[in-house]
Image (tube, grey):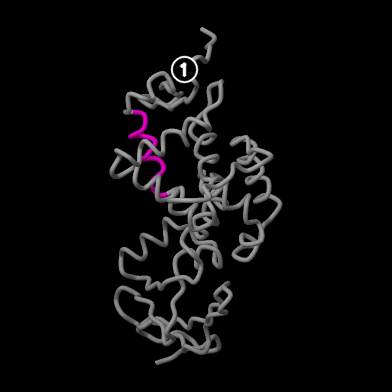
Amino acid sequence: MSIDANQSPSRTGKLSFQPSRLQLAVPSSTARMIRARTLGAPNGTFSSKSEAFMDIYDINQQFDITLRKLRRMEKAGVLRTGKSQIPHHWQMVRSDIRKGKLSARSIVLAYRYPSELEKIMEISSGHRRVIQEHVLKAEMPDRFPPPIESGPGISTIVLGAATDGGVWMSRFMPILKQHIPGRPVEYLYVAVRILLMCKNEWDIAGAAKYLCRALLKARDDPEMEGWWHREKTTVPNSYRTIYHRPDTAFDL
């Protein structure tokens, strides 16, 4: 039995919404619509009559439900989701900005492609402040480092260094060293500059996926001796990696 707002609840206590009564607008270029209704199943499963479903990032943006809760609902089987039209790397940028903590990938994408960012979310003054704080923390250069014009791109080199090493690590090592200054810097400083060498947003997304692993393997290479060290953080049993040139002087 269907119940609208003017009717009293049935004795069973179960409500069934007509598909036409609840429409969720999806904020994407395709202007997709989803019609959701409860099936009256014991677990309250949500389904849809339409061919498209919102993904958890769309729901997070549209209804301000945390991604953690949405993932729990999805895992419990009470939420059916689909594939968003927004590329995954832009979904992560949007999520990072809303959380107030941006990865190197998100900083570079937001800084290089602001018009693309504005297409997927409404940027408030608070969002702009978050982006600016991370840009300053990464010490974004005035000029972007030039991309590799011929041969494999940065994402291919980073992938090779992260998974195979060998000849790929020998190509990655000069790229890494050219971005390490004569003073101590953290991961974010180095990572942002490597990603800025990418040719486009897809290259950035591909390189970012394996960059941490490539840097980890690079630190184990004898050629990187004297180019980095570890420091304790304020968190117990936690360390951070500091990059520097071998002739860097430290205040003891």
Q: Is residue 252 above or below residue 241?
A: above
Quarter the N terminus occupies: bottom left
* Amino acid residing under circle 1: Pro
Q: Describe residue 212's horizontal placement relative to residue 244 as left or right.
A: left
Q: Describe residue 132's horizontal placement relative to residue 238 as left or right.
A: right
Residue at 66% x, 43% y is: 132
Examine the image and state in which quarter residue 6 appears: bottom right
Mark 1: secondary structure: loop
Q: Is residue 62 magenta?
A: no
Provide residue 98's location: percent of width, then percent of height. Answer: 56, 53
Provide residue 246's location: percent of width, then percent of height. Answer: 47, 17
Q: Nearer the viewer, residue 104 or 227?
A: 227
Residue at 63% x, 49% y is: 111
Q: Which residues are magenta?
A: 209-219
- The outermost residue toward the top is 252
- The outermost residue toward the front is 150
Q: Is residue 104 above or below residue 122?
A: above
Q: Describe residue 227's horizontal placement relative to residue 213 as left or right.
A: right
Residue at 51% x, 90% y is: 20
Residue at 42% x, 59% y is: 69
> Which residue is identified by label 1?
246
Provide the major secondary structure of the magenta segment: helix
